[in-house]
Image: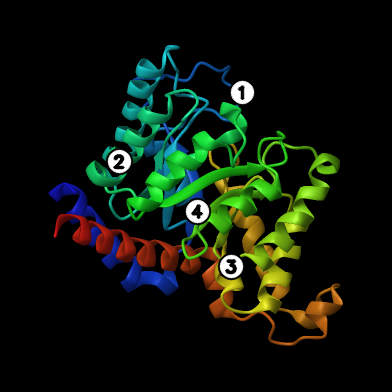
Amino acid sequence: MEEQALAHIKDLVSRLESHRGMLTIDADTHVTDSGKYPPRQAPGYYHGRAMCAEELVQEMDLAEVSMANTWQNPAATQYPGDPDSNAEALLAANEYVAKCARRYPSRFIPSGWTDPRGCGVDNACRMAEICVRRFGFLMVKMNPAQNRFPIDSPIVLKVADRIVELGAIPVFHYGADTPFTPASGLEALALRYPEHPIVAVHMGGGGAGYVEAEQLYHASIELGLRRPNIKFIFSALRDNYIEEALIRFQMAGDPFRRNLFCASDAPYGRMSWNFGGFRWLFRGLLKPEMHPDPRVRDTPGLFDLDSVRGYMGGNFADLVTAGYANLLRVHQTVTA
């Protein structure tokens, strides 16, 4: 692993450990090099509009968010068409994320992205290696929905195996917006790496409509309560199901209540809107005598400030610090 990456990891872990209880962390954001990919949408269009690092920091300040886990924006990164050229474009997008984290070390937790369909499996595995060894990323994400491959297909398994071998954490877009990410596919991955964390972004939401997503919303909660190595990011997820998951996982206790993370999916979601909603949702859960749900009302103390701080940032900080400890152990074993 490159010295610059090791230095970044040490600094990031130190910051997360020393400020764990005070951090509000958005676990899902996207940045784009606006010099390379200038915004092409009409001025009034917001959904998915490419945001550079400076714009994202402004949004974080507005929303009172301390740090953001960030990766490239797949809607903004333009593929030329052939696997090798696509890989070069994606590498540039990942490198921009690394540069952003070096420029704003106290604000960004950088994460990687790979694509076995658009870049080819070999290129996708190499991309994961570059993300981890050159850039020092802990997480490497794939998007089965956008890139149109089943979440547990052979090409995914080969790349996910490599990510796990590197000591890093495989991450997946997991939503009801396409048929490529069923709960059964995510569970197959969880069973493949039972002692290793897997992160599922959107917890079955994504771009799906409410009716279409209903079944996967419920299946995701049940799956998460069966497989404690699955971690869920609350972004692009209906508020009713966020609260239901919070109540169910909090009632289940450890380790399940440590497996949920608040997020906005910026720029696909407004950070100020999402974190304003999270804060008021938790305010209600901390007042059981006023809450309409009998599970909350009849269980005083079900939620406390410590658990709320966990969902708002502490849980993700714990995942990252523990994940980097494992990554460094793997790195030391390989280089010994």
Residue linked to disc 1:
44
The first of marks 2 and 1 along the sequence is 1
Image height check: is 304 above or below 141? below
Identify which residue is drawn at 68% across, 86% down: 301
Residue linked to disc 2:
129
Q: Secondary structure at mark 4?
A: strand
Query: Quick check: 300 left or right of 88?
Result: right
Q: Nearer the viewer, mark 2 or mark 1?
A: 2
Inter-mark Cα distance, 2 to 1: 39 Å
Q: Residue 211 location in percent, x, y? A: 86, 42
Please, what is the three-letter code of the amino acid marked with disc 3? Pro
The image quadrant where one finds the C terminus is: bottom left
Q: Is residue 160 visible?
A: yes
Q: Nearer the viewer, residue 289 or 296?
A: 296
The first of marks 2 and 3 along the sequence is 2
Q: Residue 14 location in percent, x, y? A: 27, 67
The first of marks 3 and 1 along the sequence is 1
Residue linked to disc 4:
26
Identify which residue is drawn at 38% across, 45% down: 162
Residue linked to disc 3:
228
Q: Residue 203 location in percent, x, y? A: 65, 51
Q: Residue 86 location in percent, x, y? A: 40, 19
Q: Nearer the viewer, mark 4 or mark 2?
A: 2
Q: Nearer the viewer, residue 133 or 280?
A: 133
Q: Secondary structure at mark 2?
A: helix
Identify which residue is drawn at 44% across, 64% down: 319
Please, what is the three-letter code of the amino acid marked with disc 2? Glu
User: Dot 2: few (<14), some (14–19), or many (≥20) neighbours within 10 Å?
Assistant: many
Q: Is residue 58 visible?
A: no
Please, what is the three-letter code of the amino acid marked with disc 1? Gly
Q: Secondary structure at mark 3?
A: loop
